[in-house]
Image (tube, grey):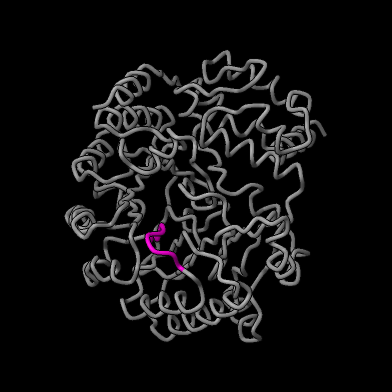
């Protein structure tokens, strides 16, 4: 274990996160891959606005690379904890219809980027992309290669459902061009699986991780969810130890957020089965300790990685980035969104495809890219997003570095935020001097709570809530 790892492990173990500290500053809020979030998108930002920004994306002489996100919404069964747009079906006719329209969308988007900007990142998400058979998935990848310029050795991710991969060897995905996998693991305890209606074999999951490693995938990321119904530290401990023994490159701790009023599948979950906040905190603290003991380094936003992982190296060298898919070693790129409800980012804009399947089909039937809504970010949005991402990536924010890019006096512009951060400083989460904000190792575990201070939309929402209570 390196000197850096030893120091980090000792510091994280010493970072006693009390329940009071968690309640005050939080650890389960926004991940800020998207700022502002989609609730602030407007329908006035339409296809015409999108095309205008695509045509003007190289203004100023900068030529950004491309990222692609492809949404495959299909699943074989309904998982009660899910927060994503999904379609439960076994109807191959319906699946073919969706893929035909997705192929048309790929071609329409490809025409807008005929100058051939390089695609350095690709992410297939869902739903469950591996619900498609190898012929269907291969056909979509072929369509992408025909219409976009994918570089060799880019970061090409596919989310894998271990319940489905048995029918398609990992080698098949590698031959298609994928070189990184994301595997969601909820809990191996049967009572937890029953409570969330997601039955995942421990044996199959560990086999898929091993197969991905043997096949030479350069990144194997496991997403572990904690705070699920019927889940206690004993159950989580068992699952975590099995995953650590499998030795994946990266392990992400994902806090389950129970929002049944927003996500319909969660209405099937009995709220009385959810662990107490003290139990959830205990699981969180235990996971941090075990992961650092096992040699994983905390990058930020509850993502842990091996010391030789490219993200760890990039963070140490100050060249880590953050985008709609999370941490990346690639500089900011334009993100083209493909598929139902997918969200993209072109220049200073965000856009989202139609989330209603019939409207999605109707737009494409008329050879129109199915943009539903979006937002042109203001100068303040861009400034605040830059500040938030700098804190997430580097844990240090130099006032001068911000002032070099944006025409503001940082301490004057963010006077209210700096005043609010004094509470975080007293709690040992960060330090502030005349030149910078530096987040401590303990603060990195609660980085989203620190970023929330710079979230203008959250501030306005709180003010409205307080006003309505007074009224």
- Of the 4 image quadrants, the one containing the C terminus is top right
Q: Is residue 458 above or below residue 216?
A: above
Q: Is residue 284 above or below residue 441?
A: below
- Direction from residue 359 to residue 260 in the image, left or right: left
Q: Position of residue 5 (x, y in %)?
A: 31, 26
Q: Position of residue 46 (x, y in %)?
A: 73, 68
- Direction from residue 263 to residue 374 in the image, left or right: right
Which residue occupies the extreme front position in the image? 61
**Range of magenta residues:** 150-157
- The residue at the point 60 percent across, 79 percent down is 108
- The residue at the point 78 percent across, 64 percent down is 44
> Per the image, is 365 magenta?
no
Q: Position of residue 217 (x, y in %)?
A: 28, 57
| Main SS, magenta residues | strand
Q: Quadrant of residue 112?
A: bottom right
Which residue occupies the extreme right position in the image? 471
Q: Nearer the viewer, residue 92 or 252?
A: 252
């Amino acid at each position: 274990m390196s000197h850096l790892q030893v120091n980090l492990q000792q510091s994280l173990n010493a970072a006693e996160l009390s329940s009071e500290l968690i309640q005050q500053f939080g650890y389960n809020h926004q991940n800020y891959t998207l700022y502002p979030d989609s609730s602030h998108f407007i329908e006035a930002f339409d296809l015409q606005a999108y095309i205008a920004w695509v045509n003007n994306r190289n203004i100023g002489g900068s030529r950004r690379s491309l990222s692609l996100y492809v949404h495959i919404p299909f699943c074989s069964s309904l998982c009660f904890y899910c927060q994503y747009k999904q379609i439960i079906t076994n109807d191959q006719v319906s699946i073919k219809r969706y893929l035909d329209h997705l192929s048309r969308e790929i071609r329409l988007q490809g025409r807008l980027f005929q100058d051939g900007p390089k695609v350095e990142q690709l992410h297939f998400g869902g739903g469950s992309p591996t619900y498609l058979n190898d012929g269907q998935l291969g056909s979509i990848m072929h369509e992408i290669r025909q219409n976009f310029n994918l570089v060799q050795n880019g970061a090409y991710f596919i989310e894998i459902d271990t319940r489905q991969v048995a029918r398609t060897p990992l080698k098949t995905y590698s031959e298609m061009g994928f070189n990184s996998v994301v595997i969601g693991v909820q809990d191996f305890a049967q009572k937890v699986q029953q409570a969330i209606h997601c039955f995942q074999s421990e044996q199959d999951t560990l086999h898929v991780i091993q197969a991905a490693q043997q096949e030479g995938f350069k990144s194997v990321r496991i997403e572990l969810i904690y705070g699920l119904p019927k889940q206690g530290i004993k159950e989580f401990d068992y699952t975590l130890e099995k995953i650590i023994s499998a030795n994946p490159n990266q392990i992400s701790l994902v806090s389950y957020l129970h929002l049944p009023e927003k996500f319909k599948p969660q209405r099937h979950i009995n709220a009385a089965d959810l662990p107490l906040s003290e139990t959830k905190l205990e699981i969180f603290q235990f996971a941090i300790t075990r992961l650092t003991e096992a040699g994983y380094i905390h990058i930020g936003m509850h993502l842990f990685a091996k010391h030789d992982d490219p993200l760890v190296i990039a963070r140490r060298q100050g060249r880590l980035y953050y985008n709609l898919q999370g941490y990346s070693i690639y500089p900011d790129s334009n993100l083209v969104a493909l598929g139902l409800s997918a969200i993209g980012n072109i220049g200073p804009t965000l856009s989202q495809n139609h989330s209603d399947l019939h409207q999605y089909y109707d737009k494409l039937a008329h050879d129109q890219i199915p943009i539903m809504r979006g937002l042109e970010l203001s100068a303040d949005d861009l400034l605040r997003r830059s500040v938030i991402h700098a804190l997430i990536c580097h844990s240090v924010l130099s006032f001068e570095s911000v002032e070099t890019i944006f025409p503001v006096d940082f301490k004057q512009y963010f006077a209210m935020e700096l005043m609010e951060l004094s509470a975080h400083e007293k709690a040992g989460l960060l330090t502030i001097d005349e030149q910078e904000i530096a987040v401590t190792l303990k603060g990195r575990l609660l980085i989203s709570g620190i970023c929330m201070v710079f979230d203008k939309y959250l501030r306005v929402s709180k003010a409205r809530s307080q006003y309505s209570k007074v009224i």
